């Protein structure tokens, strides 16, 4: 078990290294100096990921100790952490508050979003200062992912890590979720967690839309083009004399429409032979009285003037 734990710790640290969770900023808070390993020549502080992993285990133990997961609130006002917070709420069970924190959520009992959490987890103490201040009024313990320049006022468990990169935030919430599920017993060596860490990464809406359109163009466009090519045979060009129809009215029994001049110099203005005769005026209908008979005119004719 110890060997498995050690190998798991090494794999987790490698994952955090790949995500850049060890990179801090050029500024360092005096309370975060204990977590700094060294400072690079360009001025960037490098965090000790061994302490980061131990703090993740400590935070997981605190989360598991709360019986009802709905009594835990996870906040992230930073856009890069909003998807990670929602996924953490989906798999672990706490209430996720992504986006702007409404003032009074923990203190105003008449608010529609009022809640009384037993534990608060935040992504960045500087960006999520409002829920941290309200938790100090309500005596709620706070777990926070802290960078080298993060303030630690009212923070009970500080997890030293890079809280500004989208990959770093996703990996941290992914590892914390897996540790909590392992301590609960739902994830074991025989029943591993089959969730990809990519689900916790922030996705730009424009980038996701472009990828989806490109995928549709590659798959749907080719299929539609193939179906269109099968359904629509090639049509001959208008100017192609060889494509003229061979079977017309003449081929169907030599029928020639009446009144249509044929080739050979016929005069279009001359009346057609055997055409229509001028129509005769209608006569009186048997059994129906002439409507104009009472006006003194001729039968079948309308009255003229005062007749």
Image (cartoon, rainbow, N blue to C red):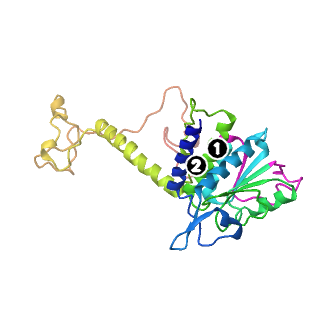
* Residue 45 visible, this orientation: no
- The local secondary structure at tag 1 comes to helix
- The local secondary structure at tag 2 comes to helix
Q: Looking at the picture, how far across and down is residue 197, in whole percent?
A: 54, 46
Q: Residue at x 31, y 36 (%)?
A: 231
Q: CA distance from mark 1 to mark 2?
A: 10 Å
Q: Residue at x 51, y 51 (%)?
A: 14
Determine if the magenta segment contains residue 98: yes
251, above or below 65, in the image: above
Q: Looking at the picture, how far across and down is residue 164, in whole percent?
A: 60, 62
* Dot 1 crowding, Cα within 10 Å, few <14, some 14–19, many 20+: many
The answer to which image quadrant residue 80 occupies is: bottom right
Q: Residue at x 73, y 41 (%)?
A: 64
The quadrant in which the N terminus is found is top right
Question: What residue is disc 2 on?
Answer: 200
Mark 1 or 2: the one toward you: 1
Q: Residue at x 83, y 54 (%)?
A: 106
Mark with earlier residue (1, 2): 1
* Dot 2 crowding, Cα within 10 Å, few <14, some 14–19, many 20+: many
Are the residues at dot 1 and dot 2 in contact (C-beta closer than 8 Å)?
A: yes
Residue farthest along the right direction in this orientation: 110
Question: What residue is disc 1 on?
Answer: 177
Relative depth, front residue between 158 and 231: 158
Residue bounds of the magenta highlight: 90-118
Q: Main structural element of the magenta stretch: helix, strand or loop?
A: loop
């Amino acid at each position: 078990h110890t060997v498995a734990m050690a190998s798991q710790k090494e794999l987790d640290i490698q994952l955090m290294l790949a995500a850049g969770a060890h990179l801090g900023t050029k500024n360092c808070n005096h309370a975060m100096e204990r977590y700094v390993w060294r400072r690079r020549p360009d001025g960037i502080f490098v965090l000790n990921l061994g302490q980061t992993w131990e703090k993740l285990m400590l935070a997981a133990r605190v989360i598991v100790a709360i019986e009802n997961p709905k009594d835990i609130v996870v906040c992230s006002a930073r856009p890069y952490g909003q998807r990670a917070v929602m996924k953490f709420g989906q798999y672990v069970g706490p209430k996720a508050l992504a986006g702007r924190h409404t003032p009074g959520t923990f203190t105003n009992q008449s608010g529609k979003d009022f809640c009384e959490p037993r534990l608060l987890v935040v992504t960045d103490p500087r960006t999520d200062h409002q829920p941290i201040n309200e938790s100090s009024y309500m005596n709620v313990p706070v777990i926070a992912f802290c960078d080298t320049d993060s303030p630690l006022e009212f923070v009970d468990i500080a997890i030293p890590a890079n809280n500004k990169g989208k990959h770093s935030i996703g990996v941290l919430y992914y590892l914390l979720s897996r540790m909590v599920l392992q301590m609960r017993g739902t994830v074991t060596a025989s029943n591993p967690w089959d969730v990809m860490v990519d689900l916790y990464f922030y996705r730009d809406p424009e980038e996701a839309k472009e990828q989806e359109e490109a995928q549709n163009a590659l798959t749907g466009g080719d299929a539609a083009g193939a179906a269109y090519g099968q359904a629509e045979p090639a049509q001959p060009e208008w100017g192609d004399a060889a494509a003229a129809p061979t079977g017309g009215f003449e081929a169907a029994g030599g029928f020639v429409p009446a009144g249509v001049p044929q080739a050979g110099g016929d005069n279009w203005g001359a009346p057609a032979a055997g055409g229509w005769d001028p129509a005769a005026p209608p006569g009186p209908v048997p059994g129906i009285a002439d409507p104009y008979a009472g006006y003194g005119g001729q039968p079948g004719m309308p009255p003229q003037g005062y007749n």
